[in-house]
Image (cartoon, rainbow, N blue to C red):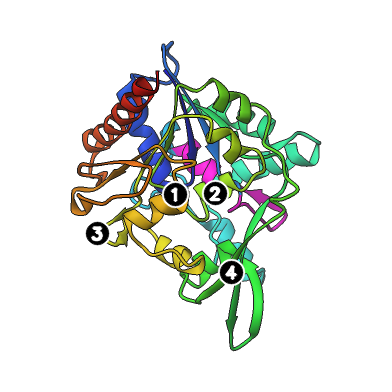
Amino acid sequence: MRIVVPAGGIGGARFLRGLKATLGIVSGRESESAITVIGNTGDDITLFGLRVCPDLDTVMYTLGGGIDEERGWGRAEESFTVKEELAAYGMKPTWFGLGDRDTATHIVRSQMLAAGFPLSAVTEALCERWRPGVRLLPMTDDQVETHVVVEDGEGRRAIHFQEWWIRHRARLPAQKIVSVGAEESRPAPGVLEAVREADLVVLPPSNPVVSVGSVLGVPGIREALEEAVVVGVSPIIGGAPVRGMADACLAAIGVETSARAVAEHYGPGLLDGWLVDEADAGVEAAGIEVESRPLYMTDADATAGIARAALDLGLRIKERRG
C-alpha cells in the first residue's frame, strides 16, 4: 500500500508511528508498503540565525527514535546550555528554547539552505541519519509562515504563530490566522506525484487549522487530495482537543470545537471518511462516512489500532467506488 499523510507535529508523529506498525514498516528493512508524509512548514521560524522546522523535526525524531517521549517534541536526554548562555548575553527571544542536541540539526539545516539547497533536499539529507521509515517531504520549498493577528495593550498587530502558541499559550484571542507566503508557494518536489500515486490519504489527528490546514493552503495540494480517497482521524474528542490548543485556532476561524464541525470544515469535497471517538458516536456530517472507535493514543497498541481503523474505513470506501 502507498499511503500519504499530511501531518503536523506531536499528534501526527505519534499517529504515524502507529501507522508504520500497522503496515509492518520497520526502518532499514524492505517493505511492500510505503508512507509519504507531507510535513507542515507553516510553523517554521528563524531564531538566532538558524532555521527551525518544528513539525518536520518532530516527525523525524519520533519515527527515528530520538524524540523526548514525555514532552513529545525536542530531543531525548536534552540539555539547554546554549539557551542559558544566550539569555546571559541578553539575546531574545527567551520564550523559545533551543536544546543543545536540537541546535545541531538547525545548524546543519541552516548551512545547507545558505548553500542553496532547497528544504526538501535538506530534509532528505537529515533523514539519512534518522531513517524514520517514511518519505518525509516538506509541503513546500518556499518560505511560508503562519502569523496570528492579535490585539492587546500593545494594539493590533501580527505575531509569529510560535510566539502566540509558546509565549502566550494561545491565550491572546486570535482575530485572524494568516499563512504568509502561501499564495505564492508551490508544492515541494514529489508532493503531488505522491498524492496521485497513493492508494489512500489519511489525515492524522493534527491541528486542522495550523498543521493540516497549512498543508492544504499550498496551491495545488488540496486540489490533488480531492481526487484521492481521503479519511481523517478527529483531533477533537467530546468537544475538546486531544492535545494542545486547537480550540483557540478553530475559534479564530469561526469553527466550533467539535468532531462534526471539523469534518464539515474539511468538507465532503476533501473528506470521504471520518473517524471519531466513541464519545462522539452518532455524529453525522453531510457527504462524509463517519465511524466511531476509541481514539486516545494511550500506548503503541492503541495507536496502531486507530491507524488500522482508519485504513479499513478508507479501503472500504475505495472498494465501493471500484
Residue that appears at 76% across and 33% down: 117
Which three-letter amino acid code belongs to the residue tagged 3? Gly
**Label 3–label 4 contact, CB within 8 A:** no
Distance from label 2 to label 4 (Cα)? 22 Å
Where does the N terminus fall, quadrant-wise?
top left
Which circle's residue, 2 or 4, is located before the other in the chain?
Answer: 2
Q: Picture coordinates of residue 45 (x, y %)? A: 64, 55
- Please indicate whether residue 145 sits to the left or right of residue 207 in the image: right
Labels 1 and 4: the sequence-earlier one? 1
Question: Going from the N terminus, do you reach mark 3 or mark 1 first?
Answer: 1
Total marks in image:
4
Based on the picture, tell me whether residue 262 belongs to the magenta stretch: no
Report the amino acid beneath label 2: Pro
Q: Answer above or below: position of 254 versus 234.
A: below
Q: CA distance from mark 1 to mark 4?
A: 26 Å
Residue 145 in sight here: yes
Residue indicated by mark 2: 54
Q: Assess disc 4: are there few (<14), some (14-19) or many (≥20) residues with their C-alpha within 10 Å of its C-alpha.
A: some
Q: Quadrant of residue 145?
A: bottom right
The boundaries of the magenta stretch are 42-61
Task: Identify the mark nearer the N-term, 2 or 1.
Answer: 2
